[in-house]
Amino acid sequence: MIPVKICSLSLVRMLPSQIENKRILLSPLNWGMGHVSRSIGLIHFLLMERNDIVVACDAAQREVYECYFDNLTYIDHQGYPFYFGGKGQFGWDLLKKSSKLRSRLKREQEEVETYVKEHDIDIVISDHRYGFRSKSCPSIFITHQYNLPVKWYQRLVNRFHYKLMRAFDHIWIMDYYDSRLAGSLSRCQKDSRIHFIGPYSRFRIYDKQTKDLEEVLIASGPKIYAQQLVDQFTGVEGIHIICDDEVSVPAGSIRVEGNWRDKDRVILRAKRIISRSGYSTIMDVECLGAECQLFATPGQSEQIYLAKKHGT
């Protein structure tokens, strides 16, 4: 049996600026790369506060982190068994994997307790991984969706969501207090464990650059939906496209090569950004001060809501 680590941090208000000289275990959700993207800015801030960071992630996520940091410790950690059929039926896609997802959540909690003990962890931070928490030290859940955008007849889904979140000691919401970015997704009643920590973007680590590119298209998320977005711009000459190697780009466009840092330098120069309406992208666009054209991933209710809210 793993001994319980007695720590008063779980009993007090905790914000990123109040965490210093700690060993932190962090893991991002493996739903696309948006959770990795937004955690880069947070990790950068926590490192400035003299914390040590241990990241539990898969190989693809680690490759991104290594573009930005050379002082992190990594644990090879399995993601959730998501499946995307490409027809916009996200609810059905998740339902088909529900049994494996529940099994993974249970096993993940056991793995986290092992990590905490082996790496002498003080605080656990989960970016929307419901199973990534510990009974041995304070655990923080990061989200922008305190409320899931489900239909009225799917209220049980939200209740289950609340139950899983409230198993954590603290809930960090990546939005302003007035919920100006996430809207109704982040609105909530006062609760001592809930803290609005503001938006986080990896682009805060850069100095501003001259915007000399008219349009940059960012095709992120599950590959099948990234390809669908790129295909919408067939025939558009000279547009810079950022996407994974597996995604084909149309003739006349410019595929941006290189690692994430190389692609960041192109995004920084964009006057207008075209992308899916993922929340990490919305935080990035606000940070960059660029115009945007956002397209919701078909069937993904969160992105449909955010695209409408931000007028695209």
Image: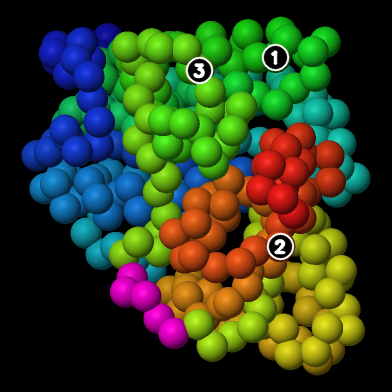
Marks 1 & 2, CB-CB < 8 Å contact: no
**For the residue labelled by badge 1, is the local secondary structure a helix, a strand or a loop?**
helix
For disc 3, the marked residue is 188
Q: Amino acid at mark 3?
A: Cys
For disc 2, the marked residue is 293
Structural crowding at the residue carrying mark 3, measured as other residues with C-alpha within 10 Å and reported as few (<14), some (14–19) or many (≥20): few
In front: label 3 or label 1:
3
Q: Amino acid at mark 2?
A: Gln
**Cα–Cα span, label 1 and label 2:** 30 Å
Which residue lies at the image location 43% right of the left edge and 74% below the top edge?
261
Structural crowding at the residue carrying mark 1, measured as other residues with C-alpha within 10 Å and reported as few (<14), some (14–19) or many (≥20): some
**Cα–Cα span, label 3 and label 2:** 28 Å
For residue 177, say whether it is visible: yes
Which residue lies at the image location 71% right of the left edge and 8% below the top edge?
156
Q: Earlier in the sequence, mark 1 or mark 2?
A: 1
Please, is residue 38 above or below residue 187 in the view?
A: below
Marks 3 & 2, CB-CB < 8 Å contact: no
Q: Residue 156 or 284: which is nearer the viewer?
A: 284
For disc 1, the marked residue is 157
**For the residue labelled by badge 3, is the local secondary structure a helix, a strand or a loop?**
loop
The colour scheme used here is rainbow
Which quarter of the rendering shows the N terminus?
top left
Q: Position of residue 217 (x, y in %)?
A: 68, 72
Q: Is residue 187 left or right of residue 253?
A: left
User: On the image, which quarter does residue 124 sit in?
Assistant: top left
In front: label 1 or label 2:
2
Q: Position of residue 143 (x, y in %)?
A: 49, 32
Q: Earlier in the sequence, mark 3 or mark 2?
A: 3
- Identify the main secondary structure in magenta: loop
Where are the magenta residues, as a range?
Answer: 206-210
Marks 3 & 1, CB-CB < 8 Å contact: no
**For the residue labelled by badge 2, is the local secondary structure a helix, a strand or a loop?**
strand
